[in-house]
Structures are given as structure tokens and as C-alpha cells.
Amino acid sequence: MTLSEAQNRTGEVVQSVSRAVRLLRCFAESEVESMTLTELAHRTGLHLTTAHRLLRTLCAESVLAYSQASERYSLGPMTLRLGRSAAEFSGLDHVAPLLRRLVDDTGETAGFSTREGAMVRTMVTVESEQPLRFDGRSQTRTPMHISAAGKALLAFGPQPLAEAVAALGRLPASTDRTLTTFRALEADLAVSRARGYTVCDEEQFVGVRAYGAPLLDEHGIARAAIAVIGPTARLTDARVPDVVASVQAAAAALTRVLHLERLG
């Protein structure tokens, strides 16, 4: 049982704090910079007056900022300071330089990701300088079964593979090569676990291939993952040994400098 589950069971969770966190989570899960009171209340299921009261408090503490001109809320200076501190103390400030080295080694876009439920969030992306490249963005969320990083988190996660796959629920197709059955995905993850890396071969986008590797904690559980993504015309079978070696080396380097226990 996790601490949050234990607190819920014993009634130790403070409702107002929980609701405020729900409001803040909207900004973590959204791809827009700011939102209105109505949008935030709708996303959280809070009554407008409750949401308004909490938002005013968060603004008073500089956790959020409010623009009277646009009537929209955005992250405030305190949140930005917390983010910088979290990046420094967790080691995340090392991610971009090491991904840049991976991009230089492979010539392809590289990303660092963590899990969010049945999704994988790309926290940091460093793009290739090739004219034809995968145009990735940081802070995007992708279904785990169509992501090399997502597959790495599943294949090396804490659950047995069958349970991990079933917990995802429906596996919608993005291309005709997407693995859409539990049996096919479980078999793919078993192969990935045995060889130490994952492949996403045109399963998210036609003409795009990716190779991923997990960042394992002291118990051998994946807490994050990295991947190299590029066009199939360049990420050919002949390049697999070199590309995979570079991805695994970068994963090992990041494992040494990150505090993985703080990533989930």
C-alpha cells in the first residue's frame, strides 16, 4: 500500500489540499499555457465557487498567476522555482546534455520519458539536426503501447507482463502495424525484456522507427526510459547494433546521475 492509499484509508487527506492539487495537475496535463476558471472547474469537476476560492489562494501564494486582461490562470513564480529545485535535486538538469550526446552519436531525435497511468510523458526532447527528422515535443503524452519508451517502462516494470498489458485496457491502432491485442503486445514485451531494449516499428507513425531502453532502479524496476526516434530510411536494420548500444549507454549514464526514486 502506498502512503497516499494509507492516508486515504485513515482519513488523513485534507480535502482542500487535494482539490488544490487537482487544479495544479490540470497545468501538468495540459498542452496550453493558461486556462479560465470555467475550464479549470470543468476539468476538475469542482463547483465554480470552490474552484474560484482555491485559485485565488494559489494566486495569493504565487503558485499560480492571474491575468485580468485575459481572465486566465497560469503557473506562477513559486511553481517555477519549485520546478527548478525539483530538476536540480532529482538530477533532471543532466538529462538534456546527455540526450544531446545521444543525438550526436545517432543523428536522430532523442527523448526522456516517465509513466503517467496508461500513458508515457516525454519530459525532455532533443531534436536531430537532420532536415528530415522526427519533430518531437517535450511534455507530450502518448499511449504506452505505441511508444518505445512506453514499452520499456512496461517490459521492465514492477508487474508481470500479462497484468501490465491488461491494465492498459483497450489498445487503439495508430497505424496498421500497431499491436492491438494483449497477446501480441505481451509477446513483444517479453522479447524486449530478454534482449534489453524495445522497438517501435511504424506502430505510432508510418515511416518512423524508435529504439528504447529503461532506466532501472536498484531493484531492477524501470522508473524512466529514453528512446531514439527517426525515419525508417535512416534507422535501418544494419544500424540496429550501433544505435541500440548508444541508447543503452545513455540510459546507463542517466541512471548514474538521476535520483530515480523521485521519478515515480
Image: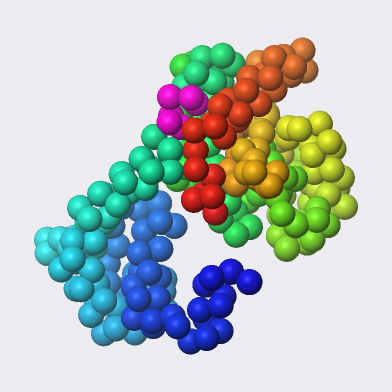
Picture coordinates of residue 264, whole percent (x, y): 54, 54
Q: Residue at x 40, y 56 (%)?
A: 28
In the image, 195 versus 91, the foreground residue is 91
Q: Which residues are magenta?
A: 94-99
Picture coordinates of residue 238, whole percent (x, y): 77, 12
Q: Residue at x 58, y 43 (%)?
A: 224
The question of residue 264 being in magenta is answered with: no
Horizontal side of 10 relative to 35 (left or right) equals: right
Horizontal side of 96 relative to 158 (left or right) equals: left
Picture coordinates of residue 151, whole percent (x, y): 70, 43
Q: Main secondary structure of the magenta part?
A: helix
Q: Residue at x 39, y 34 (%)?
A: 93
* Residue 261 position (above or below residue 128): below
| Image quadrant in which you'd find residue 236 | top right
Q: Look at the image and tell me in which quarter the N terminus lies.
A: bottom right
* Residue 97 position (above or below residue 226): above
The structure's colour scheme is rainbow
| Image quadrant in which you'd find residue 110 | top right
Horizontal side of 58 relative to 85 (left or right) equals: left
Picture coordinates of residue 251, whole percent (x, y): 60, 30
In the image, 218 versus 21, the foreground residue is 218
Q: Residue at x 19, y 73 (%)?
A: 56
